[in-house]
Image (cartoon, helix red, strand yellow):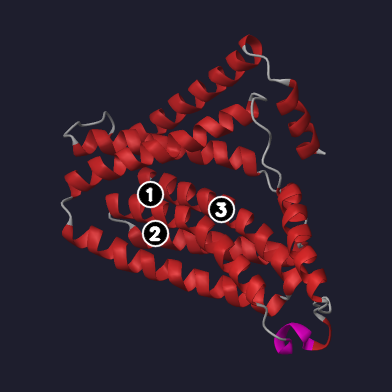
Amino acid sequence: MTSAVILALAVFGASCVEMVEALTIVVAAGVSRGWRSAFEGTLVAVIALTVIVAAVGVPLVRLVPLDALRVVVGGLLLVLGLNWLRKAILRASGHKALHDEDAIYARTLAELSGDRSSSATPAPSFRHGAWRHGPRDSTGFVVAFKGVFLEGMEVVMIVITLGSSSRRLGLAAAAAAAAVVIVGVIGALVARQLSEVPENAMKMGVGIMLTSFGVFWVGEGAGLHWPGSDLFLLGLVALFALSAFVMIRSMRQLVPPSPVVERAADVSVS
């Protein structure tokens, strides 16, 4: 039960983070190029990602021996989790600018609006069902598809690795689907207020959980019996959380952030 809860939280958190980033691109594409094309690009990307999960994840669960799968998947999760954790520690310590969805939105919107202004096409609107009956825009479709597909591929990797290693592919997929629905609903309500999402804190938590799962499954796949079985996962989570806290404090004191990064972070926070 403990591993199932942590698995669901890890998949849900990672999916929320990636979907917020994808939503930023979709909203910018919809506002600047037309909502119909943005929605269609999003839908096609979601269908493609679902097919990948079914095509890769199901055979892994049924055909690959569990111990071998856990060693390989655990190694992949360690690489993925440590990468998330490294970036989160750098951001929290002031050595990397905070991830700012408002800045990404503004940049994407400016790029797409500039392209549209050169074509002298009227700006898209929700009024009078224009988003349903207006002409399709290939640029808006491609931008929305690429944004959702590329951000979603990391979610797919996490769903497949966590789900197949624990033989809980359905739970992992359900957690990811719940994140997609929740982020989509919230996005429809708050539109561009994406900076209110505590994305950097979520990335820290996801990095800690993925790293913990990686260590846990590499050990189990190699024949190591953890004390307390699945409950040992909580100890690994606490260990990596404490390690991240100590590293952040140490880096702030011993390695002052550069002025360039500090200015970028200040702009992001504002």
Question: Residue at left 74%, top 32%?
Answer: 265
Mark 2 touching mark 1, by CB under 8 A?
yes
Q: Dividing the image into 4 quarters, which one contains the C terminus?
A: top right
Q: Is residue 47 above or below residue 83?
A: below
Residue, disc 3:
18
Residue, disc 1:
4
- Comparing marks 2 and 3, which lies closer to the viewer? 3
Mark 2 touching mark 3, by CB under 8 A?
no
Q: Is residue 130 left or right of residue 146?
A: right
Queried whether the magenta region covers residue 7, the answer comes back as no
Sequence-first tag of 1 and 3: 1
Sequence-first tag of 2 and 1: 1
Q: Quadrant of residue 211?
A: top left
Q: Amino acid at mark 3?
A: Glu
Q: Which residues are magenta?
A: 129-134
Q: Is residue 31 above or below residue 220?
A: below
Secondary structure beneath disc 2? helix
- Residue 15 circle label: none
- Comparing marks 1 and 3, which lies closer to the viewer? 3
Residue, disc 2:
171
Question: Residue at left 68%, top 58%?
Answer: 24
Q: Is residue 256 above or below residue 202?
A: above
- The percent coordinates of residue 167 (x first, y second) are 27, 55
Q: CA distance from mark 1 to mark 3?
A: 21 Å
- The percent coordinates of residue 251 (x first, y second) are 60, 16
Secondary structure beneath disc 1? helix
Query: Could you say which is closer to the camera, residue 190 or residue 49?
Result: 49
Question: Residue at left 73%, top 72%?
Answer: 33
Q: Amino acid at mark 1?
A: Ala
Mark 1 touching mark 3, by CB under 8 A?
no
